[in-house]
Amino acid sequence: MVAMTEPRDPPTGCAMFGIYSGLFRRRRSASMTSLHRIDEAPAVAPLANPAHHQKPAVHHDASSLARRPNAVPVPAAQNGAVARAAPPAANGRGRTVTKAVNGAGGPRPAVEPAAEYTGMAAELDRMILDHQRVKGTTQLVRATSGNMMLHRNLGNLNAGATGTAVRSPVVERGGTAAANERKAPPNGYASSGMGNIVREPRTPAAAGELCRALSHRTDPEKLKEMGNEEYRQGHYEEAVALYDQAIMMDARRPAYWSNKAAALAALGRLIEAVADCKEAVRIDPSYDRAHHRLGGLYLRLGEADKAIYHLKQSSNESASADVSRAQSVKSRIAKSNDARRLKNWFTVLQEAQAAASDGADCAPQVMALQAEALLRLQRHDEADSLLSSAGAPRFGVDESTKFFGTFGHAYFLIVRAQVDMAAGRFEDAVATAQTAFQLDPSNREVAVVQRRAKAAAAARLRGNDLFKAAKFVEACAAYGEGLDREPGNAVLLCNRAACHAKLGRHEKAVEDCSGALVVRPSYSKARLRRADCNVKLERWEASLRDYQVLIQELPENEDVKKALSEVEAKLKDQRNGAAAARSQH
């Protein structure tokens, strides 16, 4: 079977020049000195054992050129009549040996080795030989000592490239002439990069993206521009990654650090943003934009003094207004802390909310002041919503402690622990309070909250175990002990109401459920239990009000729908009976 070879176009002028240049260099090197040749190598080696000289299977890899011996035999042509001349040996001792093979299928002829030689010429011939062995073609011609040429493409090994359409005279097996049209580049080369092995891209778009990515990887300014575009589109994670790449290439540009800080701030990673802004200011202390951005970050985090300092360093048009806001935040936080010491919770809440409105919207201290005031004002649901909102701080313990100090972060943690207890998350409350105690063990307030959290959690766990064992009296007492440590806890009140209901003490159950709903109006479990207890007490109107609220909160609950219908029917019967009684009188 005759192997198909790629069509070979006639060489162009550039190609012929390259060929003659290569021949000239080789002849010149042969006529000069024998420093790079083996002086005593015979022109032709005897073939004492032809079988011994048969070539073994060759496995090509990246290091094959380095391991190949210096002697370069001239291969016999295969699958067609092809002749090749070995390079002349030094001092004219070598002789040209030409072998020709017509056809295929016969025994492989012996190969007469040529004179051995070394240096760049030998290395290039080895590369040509490797390519011929792999491709099964002799169309690769060495043009110069520094380049290789395939199909007139100087310096590249390329099977095709994009450009203007050129129709190939040979159609691949199973294809059509139209399907085998290829595009040639306008400059006549297969690739703009010389000395590379280039594969034809699948699509022009993919090639463009690759070139764009490669060029941008070495241009930090382009990466910054790409990051700016991602930022404008709201892709903040991508923007951060691009700014990071730009910083890795050139960390001395303050704009890269400042822009990255803006993207981090948009992701809520404010403490990281502060660190990057500080780096920008360190690199260029006169960088106005970085000062203004850093001042704004400090303001959002409630660090009013630092915010004022950096805002004053900026020449931004809004800097004076921002300084006034920062001063207002500082004043309101001070007033809120003073009111807290006096346990004036209305004032604490009012001033803390005003500070958040003035710009300290992500300050843990300001948010903790608001949550604590809401707890003391028996507005547990609002406190929980505040700390569970998207704008609530989500800083790690280490970074928050380092940034705000031990006391500041411990205060935030004990408030969160109390909010968790109010919402019935006792295990979370204990863990958070324990973390606060580890940070500030000498703080008396922290120690008190930790003990309260542990006692309430233990009481609730013990009460649950007793309730499951149907020991309702003991369970009721256990929940009562927890309420002694954590008064007004909605979960403990509701659980104790369940014990009262099991014991037939529906009036007490209604009282505990009402107490739970005072602090948590959205506590559906307590409202459902109170409605059921009112049914037992035949308080149809009170029960109807609770079921009407529940049907709004749980519109798909079939039990609530059924109970509401029954209560409405009972209330209707009661009213009809009352009307009939009045008519008899």
Image (cartoon, rainbow, N blue to C red):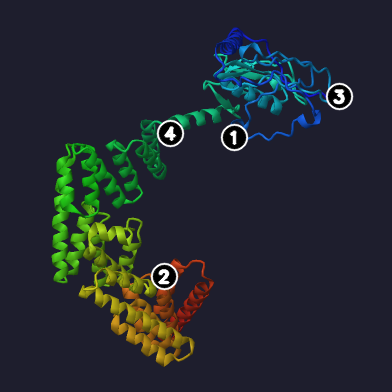
Nearer-the-camera pick, 393 or 8: 8
Under circle 1, the secondary element is loop
Cα–Cα gap, marks 3 and 2: 98 Å
For marks 3 and 2 on the same chain, the one whose residue lies earlier in the sequence: 3
> Mark 1 belongs to which amino acid?
Ser
Rounded to the nearest angstrom, the CA distance separating label 4 from label 2 is: 61 Å
Q: Mark 4: which secondary structure?
A: helix
The residue labelled by disc 2 is 549
Q: Quadrant of residue 40?
A: top right
In which quarter of the view is residue 585 placed?
bottom left
Tell me, for residue 63, which label it has, or none: 1
Q: Nearer the viewer, mark 3 or mark 4?
A: 3
- Counting from the top left corner in percent of width and height, residue 303 is at 20, 54
Residue 504 is at least partly visible in this image = no
Q: CA distance from mark 3 to mark 4?
A: 55 Å
Name the residue tied to disc 3: 106
Name which residue lies at 60% across and 24% down: 123
